Amino acid sequence: MIIFQNVSKFYNNNSHQTTALEDASFTINSKEFVSLVGKSGAGKSTIVKLLIAEEKPTNGRVIFGSYDVNKIKQHELPQLRRRIGVIFQDFRLLPNKTSFENVAFALEAAGRLQSDIEEFVPQALEMVGLKDKMFNFPKELSGGEKQRVAIARAMINHPDMIIADEPTGNLDPINAWEIIKLLIKINELGTTVLLATHNKEIINYLERRVINLENGRITRDEEKGKYILV
Ligand SMILES: Nc1ncnc2c1ncn2[C@@H]1O[C@H](COP(=O)(O)OP(=O)(O)OP(=O)(O)O)[C@@H](O)[C@H]1O
Ligand SMILES: [Mg+2]
């Protein structure tokens, strides 16, 4: 379960203060599929960064399962981050590693045995339909394929939650749908999904919970939300 309790995030740059998030409160239960919607600069990625402890809130509390994220100790960070798989608009694959190696890297970092790597990496790549591209490098893959490698990498440690920050932003509509279908499948298999997106068609198709942000404030939080931006 995720709880944001009166969370604000202010950035101070050159004596100018930016409000990235202001007094945001919401709860996400296990196995939910939640979309975060809002214009550029509304605060979507800020919520993501607070969840993975890349930023600290100025005020308020962020709870992830048994972790109070703002109080997390440095040595607990890898454990927290292993429980959250993140995928980004720009894929963030290592360019000099194959699909296999990109996914294996996340298992190696978790200290897993070589025998596990050889068993689980092909399974993860099969789940995303990329077994035949296992030994290709990112530059030899299409955008949709790169994002599917990133999903396999995000899923390899069986996280409680997948966060997808504008995962379809660099993809054409057909590839975008493939990624959304995969996220739905991952959710149906029991993983919580948090999707930050601008994509109206996707939001309206999903008919799931939508949290709307405007200038760092939550303006709507609806069970079967529609894409409404004013
Ligand atoms: N490190 C930073 N320093 C100063 N301001 C920042 C920083 N990071 C984000 N901001 C500001 O915080 C606000 C929220 O940014 P955020 O990245 O959360 O928006 P977003 O909803 O993800 O937008 P986009 O759709 O463009 O990705 C913006 O005004 C942004 O300029
Ligand atoms: Mg963003």
Image (cartoon, rainbow, N blue to C red):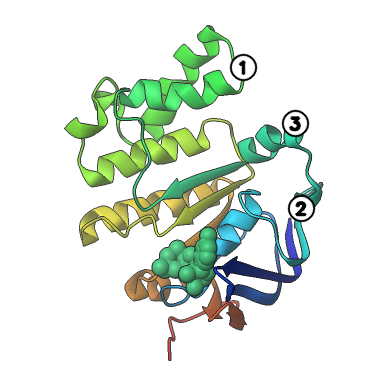
Q: Quadrant of residue 85?
A: top right
Q: Kindly report the distance in space between the C-alpha atoms of the residues bearing marks 1 and 3.
A: 15 Å
Q: For mark 2, does the 10 Å Cα neighbourhood hold few (<14), some (14 to 19), or many (20 or more) residues? A: many
Q: Answer with the quarter of the image where residue 126 lies.
A: top left
Upstream in sequence: badge 2 or badge 3: 2
In the image, 144 versus 40, the foreground residue is: 40
Classify the position of the N terminus by image quarter. Answer: bottom right
Q: Is residue 158 left or right of residue 41?
A: right
184 or 193, which is in the foreground?
A: 193
- Numbered circle sitting on residue 225: none
Indicate which disc, 1 or 3, sits on the residue closer to the N terminus: 3
Q: Residue at x 76, y 53 (%)?
A: 70
Report x, y in % for residue 26: 70, 71
Callout 1–callout 2 Cβ contact below 8 Å = no
Question: Pointer 2 and pointer 3: residues touching (CB < 8 Å)?
Answer: no
**Is residue 109 positioned above or below 128 on the image?**
above
Residue type pointed to by label 2:
Asn
* Cβ at disc 3 under 8 Å from ligand 1: no
Q: Which residue is mark 3?
A: 75
**Residue 70, label in figure:** 2
Label 3: how many residues lie within 10 Å, few (<14), some (14-19) or many (20+)?
few
> Which residue is at a point 64% across and 44% down the rendered structure image?
160
Q: Nearer the viewer, mark 1 or mark 2?
A: 2
Dot 2 lies on which element? helix
Q: Residue furthest bottom?
A: 230
**What kind of element bears circle 1?**
loop
Question: Which amino acid is tagged 1?
Answer: Gly
- Image position, residue 91 (x, y; %): 36, 44
The Cα–Cα distance between marks 1 and 2, rounded to whole angstroms, is: 26 Å
For the image, the number of numbered tags is 3
Position of residue 62 relative to residue 60, above or below, is above
Disc ID at residue 111:
1
